[in-house]
Amino acid sequence: DGSLGLRWTQADFDASSWTQAPTGVGWETNGGALEPLIKTNISAQLRSINGGAYFRWEFDFNNADAVNAATLNVQSDDGFIAYLNGIEIGRLNAPNPAAWNSNADGSESDNAVVAGVQIDVSANKDGFRNGTNVLAIHAMNSSTGGSDFLIRAGLDINETIVPNPLVLNESQTFTARVRVGDFWGAPVVQSYAVGTTPATAANLMVSEIMYH
């Protein structure tokens, strides 16, 4: 409700009392185009009661300093405002300003809803943080008693992953194979010497030669 302000969009907001449910969330008439996308029906909780609702998707992420780009993907009937850790990153058909009980100020065709919207949010990549993050969305219907409603959302993150080095404390022999799809490459065996002095012209002496 209005007493929450925007605190509910923050990653450290205590949402333990909120209902957890599979996404997508909403309702649709029997046989409607959005019906296959809806996993949690909230018609009894929202329809003819309020113009919209708040939703949170928490996720762990531990590479915040290496984000190259990010895309917000949303299927929404009819409008939304999206936040990443409290920072607005995208909106569609949303009034400005939007109150907790606002309706969307536009609507989308079912085909457009199914196709979804993709918003480049790379300008907000500094909003990611190591640890718990939250994608928070204020989803709105164009009318309080609308015949359908849907919100599904996610983030695609392009990141640079630097492999962690394998530190050897003693000499070891490794066997490795490469997997591509369902196919494995041939084994490769490699030995590594640790704690020994490499052979050089100064410390290597040939004392005997065998020949035939």
Image: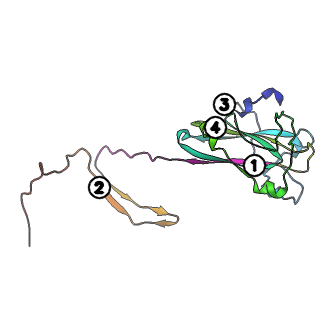
The local secondary structure at tag 4 comes to strand
Which type of secondary structure does the marked residue at label 3 adopt?
loop
Using the image, tell me which numbered label, if any, was put on residue 12.
3
Q: Which residue is mark 2?
A: 191
* Mark 2 to mark 4 CA distance (whole Å): 42 Å
> Residue at 87% of width from left, 35% of height from top?
101
Count the labels in the image.
4
Marks 1 and 2 in Cβ contact (< 8 Å): no
Q: Where does the image place residue 42, in percent across and percent down from the top left?
A: 84, 45
Q: Residue 143 in the image: state x and y as whole percent.
A: 91, 44
Q: CA distance from mark 3 to mark 1?
A: 22 Å
Question: Disc 3 vs disc 2: Cβ atoms closer than 8 Å?
Answer: no
Distance from the alpha carbon under mark 3 to that under mark 2: 48 Å
2 and 4 marks in contact (CB < 8 Å):
no
Looking at the image, which is closer to me, 16 or 92?
92
> Where does the magenta region start and end?
150-171
Quote the CA–CA distance across marks 1 and 2: 51 Å
Residue holding disc 4: 133
Instruction: Give the Cα distance between marks 4 and 3.
Output: 9 Å
Q: Which residue position is annotated with label 1?
A: 152
Looking at the image, residue 204 sits to the left or right of residue 157; the answer is: left
Q: Amino acid at mark 1?
A: Arg
Q: Is residue 68 left or right of residue 76?
A: left
